[in-house]
Amino acid sequence: MNRILLMLSLLAIIICGGSINEAQASVIINQKNIGKYKIYENMEILEDKGGNLTIDDVSSTTLSNQFIENKEGIPSYGYKSSVYWMRFEIDNQLSTDKYILEFPYAPHDSITLYEQTKTNKHLAYYGGDLLPFSERDRKHRHVTFELTLPEKETRIYYVKIKSEGSLQLSVVLWDEETFSEKSIIEYLLFGIYYGSTLVMVVYNIFLYSSLRLRSYLWYVLLIFAVSMTQLTLNGFAYQFLWPDFPWWNNRSIVFSIALSNLAGALFVNKFLDVQQYAKIWSRILHMLTAFNIGILIVLMMSYSLALHLVTLSTILFIPVVLTTTILCWKRGNKAARYLFFAWFIFLLTGLISSLSDAGTLPLNTFTRYASLIGSLFEMILFSLALADRVKIIQREKENAERAALLLNEELEERVQKRTEELQISTEKLVSVERSRRHLLSNISHDLGTPMTSIQGYVKAMLDGVIEPCDQTYLKIIHEKTLYIDRLIEDLHDLSRLEERQASFSLNEVSVQKFIQFLYQFKADVTSKNIDFQFEHQVSLEPNEWVLLMDLNRIRQVMENLISNAIKYTKENGFIKIDVIEYEEFYRRQEHQEEIAVAIEKIGNIYRNQSLVIGVHDNGIGIDAESLPYIFDRFYRADAEQYDTYRNAGLGLAIAKEIIDYHNGMIWAESLESKGSSFYFTLPIYTGEQGENK
C-alpha cells in the first residue's frame, strides 16, 4: 500500500513537472529564424516586490506556477522598486552553438543571468551599470552574455533585473555573425550622429567667439547636454567616458536631462529675447532654470527623488517652451517659427521616450529611439534658426555699413557745404571789414570835411579876413550844418530800420494814385536840365488794384533813387521811371535770370500780383566790382566825391530796409559807362493775413 502511494506521488510530481515544462515558453532556434531571436516574445515574468527571492526560490516548484507568460511585446514597467525575474528556455536545433544574449537597454542597474545545468544547478553571470565596465562578460555598450548552446539541446535560463530607473525587459538572442554586423552598423550610425553634434558644438563655439551672442553659448550647452543624454541612454558614455565610475554612470542620465532642460530654458529665453516679447513667460523660464539647478543638487543626495523631479521638469518644460515660442512668433519674432517646430518635435519625442520609460506607452524601436530622432531634427531646425539669425545680423551689418556710407557721404556733403558756407562767410567778413573801414572813413570824411570848412570860415570871420555878415559865407556854413544834421538823422533812421523799431503808417493806396505819385518826381529831374521819361503798363481802372504802403517812406525811397540817378547823369541826359506787372517783367529776356529766380523764391506768394518799379539813367554806370555792395551802408564807389549830402552812402541802405519792410525786393543792374537801372517790387494787397507787415 505504501509502495502504491509512493508511486502515485512520483507520478503526480512527474505530471506536474511535465505540465510546468509545457507551460514554459521555448525559443526554438531553427532555419526559419536565423540570426535574431526575440526572447521577450517567448518568456515568463515574475515580480518580486520585496526583492528577497533567490534563484533557488524562483526555480522551485512553489513559485514556478507564479510566472506569467508575456503577451504584450517588450515589457516596460516604468519606475518601480520591484525586482523582476524572467524565465525562458532555448531549444537549439542548429549546429551553431555560439550565441549572444543582449539586453538592449543600457541604464539597467543590475542584470544577473542564471543558466541551469544538467545537474539542476545554476551558473550566474553578472552585468548592469553598477558593475564596473571592465568586469563585464563582453565589452559592449549593452549588457551582453555569451551563450554556448549544444545542438539538439534545450536549456532553461532565469534573469534577475533590478533598477532604480526605468524597467524595460527587452531580451534578444543573436548568433555571433549577425550580432557583429548589427553592432558595426549601430556604431557607425551613432558615430555619424555624435560626430555631427561635435561639429555643431565646435562651430557654434566659433560663432560665439565671433559674434559674442550669449544665446550661442547656451545652444552649445544644450547640444552638449542632449548629446550626453543620448550617450548615457545608449551606453556609449559608460563604455568610453567613465567605465570605472558606476556611481556616476547611474546618475548621469538624470544629470544630463536636467542640464538639457536648464540649457533649453536659457537658450529660448536669450535667443528669442523673451523679456521683450513675453515678460511673464521669461520669468517662468527663469523659474524653470532654477528648478533644474535644484534637481542637480538633489541628485547628489537622492537619485530616486531627482529622477521623479526631472520627469516632472520635463513634463512642465514642454508647455512652457511651446507657449513661449508661440507668443514670441505671434508678436513679431520671426526666429521663433524655427524654434517652435524644433521644440515641438524634440519635446514630443522626448515625452514619448519618457512615457515609454515610465511604462505608459508600449516599448518598441520607435519609442526607444524617439528622443534620439527628435534631437536630430531639433539640431537641424536650431541650425536653421541660428543661420537665420546670422543672416539677420549680416543684413543688419550691411544696412549699418550702408547707412554709415550714406552718413559719410552726407557728412562729406555737409563738410563741403559748410566749407563753402565758411568761405562765403569769410568773404562776407572781408566785405564787412571793408565796409567797416569804408564806414569809418566815410563818417570821418563826411563829418570832418564840412566841419573843417565851417571852422575855416568862422576863423576867417574872426580874423577879419572876410566880413562877419557876408551872406555868401553864412549861406555856405548853413548848408554845411544842414548836411551834418541830415547825416546824423539818417544814421539814426537806418539804425531803427535795421532793428525793426522804425514806425510805419501803412495805408491802402490805389495803383492809379501811386502812379500819379511817381509822376510828381518829374520836377526834381527837369530842374537839373535832365530829360524825364515816364512809362507804365498797368491798368488804371479805379478800385482794381490796391497797394498797402507807407507813402512817406516810399517817397524817401524814390528821393534816394532819383537823387542818386541825378548825381551820376550829365546834363541833357535822361532819367526814366517805369511801372510794370511782375509777369511781364519776368518774361523780358534782357533781365538777368538769377534776378528773376531770386524774385520767384522771395515773393512766390505774390506771383501775378506784384508791381515792379524801375528808375533808369544813362549816366556813368556802376562797375561790376562795386555793384554787389551798393546797398551796404556807407559804401560808395567814388569816395572822393562828397560835395553833396547823397554822397554819404546811406540812401540806398535806407531804401533797402524800407522795401524789405513792405515785403518787396530791391536790386540794381548796370553796365559801366552805359547807365544804371534800380528796381524794387511792391506786392498787390489782397487783404490776406500776413501778406503785408
Image (tube, rainbow, N blue to C red):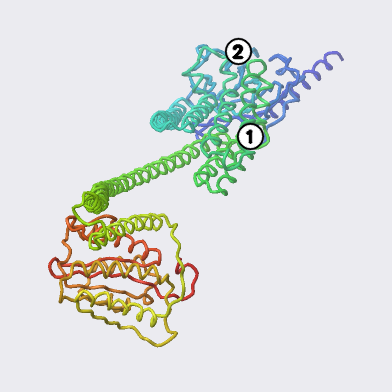
The single residue placed furthest to the left in the displayed view is 673
Amino acid type, callout 1: Arg
- Of tags 1 and 2, which is closer to the observer? 1
Question: Which residue is drawn at the image coordinates 50% and 38% (left, top)?
Answer: 378
Amino acid type, callout 2: Leu
Q: What element carries label 2?
A: strand
Q: Which mark is residue 442?
A: none
Q: How crowded is mark 1: few (under 14 residues within 10 Å), some or many (20 or more)?
A: some
Q: Which mark is residue 123?
A: 2
Residue 380: horizontal and vertical position, in percent?
46, 39
Residue 647: horizontal and vertical position, in percent?
24, 59
In the image shown, does 590 or 27 lie closer to the viewer?
A: 590
* Image quadrant in which the N terminus is located: top right
Separation (CA) of disc 1 from disc 2: 58 Å
In the image shown, does 652 or 28 lie closer to the viewer?
A: 652
621 above or below 88? below
Instruction: Name the image quarter holding residue 517.
Output: bottom left
48 above or below 76? above
Residue 188 appears in view? no
Question: Which residue is drawn at the image coordinates 70% and 14% (left, top)?
Answer: 54
Q: Mark 1 points at which residue?
A: 283
Residue 529: horizontal and vertical position, in percent?
19, 76
Left or right relative to 274: residue 386: left
The single residue placed furthest to the bottom in the displayed view is 541
Q: What element carries label 1?
A: helix
